[in-house]
Amino acid sequence: MRRDTIFYKLFKQFPLLLFELVDEPPPEAENYQFESVEVKETAFRIDGVFLPPANAVTKTVFFAEVQFQKDDELYHRFFSELFLFLYRHSIRYDDWFGVLIFGSRSLEPTSSMIHRALLESGQVRRVYLDELGDLRQQPLGLGLMLLTNVTSETEAVEGARFLLEQARQQSEQAIIDLVTTILVYKFSNLSREEIAAMLGLNLEEPRAILEAKEEGKVEGERTIVLRLLNRRVGNIPDALLSQIQGLSVEQLEALGDALLDFSTLADLEGWLQGQPRG
């Protein structure tokens, strides 16, 4: 499951979710805007930036990173991107805070010694989803985060049904959509009818499933692939971006696998040249 895509959707629709993980959220938390920000003249793209409203008393910018696989370069990259962003926008913000969300503690980089001053500064919080407890005991937003981390099929379905019931009681259609989207990604081998039956949904309300299969999956795959390509080969020229925009979801998934072996733009160009044109 492409969990980066799920968290992008979560934060985009519910920016307040991040502040449920922060001990002292800013007074203007409900007015923060979530963005994916490209830092010009570098190969960096920061996926989780929460920008304060223009009228905020203290303009604190929040950075979020979600990690579901081992990456020993994570802290190097996260803090490089963070401080480069602040350098480019030094006049706009007064302070910063970083939130690193791990599926489990075991996914942290092997060594954090070189970054200990930052990690222990009080400006960074590390969150381990598998240590937050039962999703049924959490607010709806955190429950969604925990659902992405459930590995058991039975527990995932039971947790999804619980969240759906809570969302219905609170008339939270967006939550219903996201619960369904998460299950679509988890059980990609099932049809929308099978997923609807699994969740107890009427086939007359499959909007979220269709979104996930059509718009969400294509856009989600493209977002993740572009992010990974930027990290592997640097900034991508407009001509190649245009070709990537035209790829089908199956081609994007294939590119996501192939790019792990890329080291230069020439590798990307060669791969794209081998793809059939629509």
Image: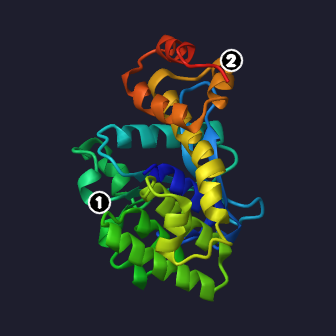
Find residue 123 and report its horizontal and vertical position in percent: 45, 59
- Res 137 quadrant in image: bottom left
Above or below for 171 versus 2: below
Q: Residues within 10 Å of mark 2 (few under 14, many from 20)?
A: few
- Tell me if residue 260 comes above or below residue 217 in the rendering: above
Report the front residue among 228 and 82.
228
Is residue 26 visible in the rendered structure shown here?
no
Q: Position of residue 229 (x, y in %)?
A: 50, 28
Q: Is residue 58 placed above or below 256 in the rendered structure?
A: below
- Front position in the image: 233 or 260: 260
Q: Is residue 268 left or right of residue 132?
A: right
- The foreground one among 106 and 156 is 156
Q: Which mark is residue 104?
A: 1
Q: Amino acid at mark 1?
A: Ser
Q: How is the image coloured?
A: rainbow
SS at circle 2: helix
Q: Position of residue 188 (x, y in %)?
A: 46, 53
The numbered dot on residue 239 is 2
- Estimate how packed mark 1 is, as few (under 14), some (14 to 19) or many (20 or more) residues with alpha carbons within 10 Å: some
Q: Is residue 254 left or right of residue 107?
A: right
Q: Is residue 103 visible?
A: yes
Q: CA distance from mark 2 to mark 1?
A: 39 Å
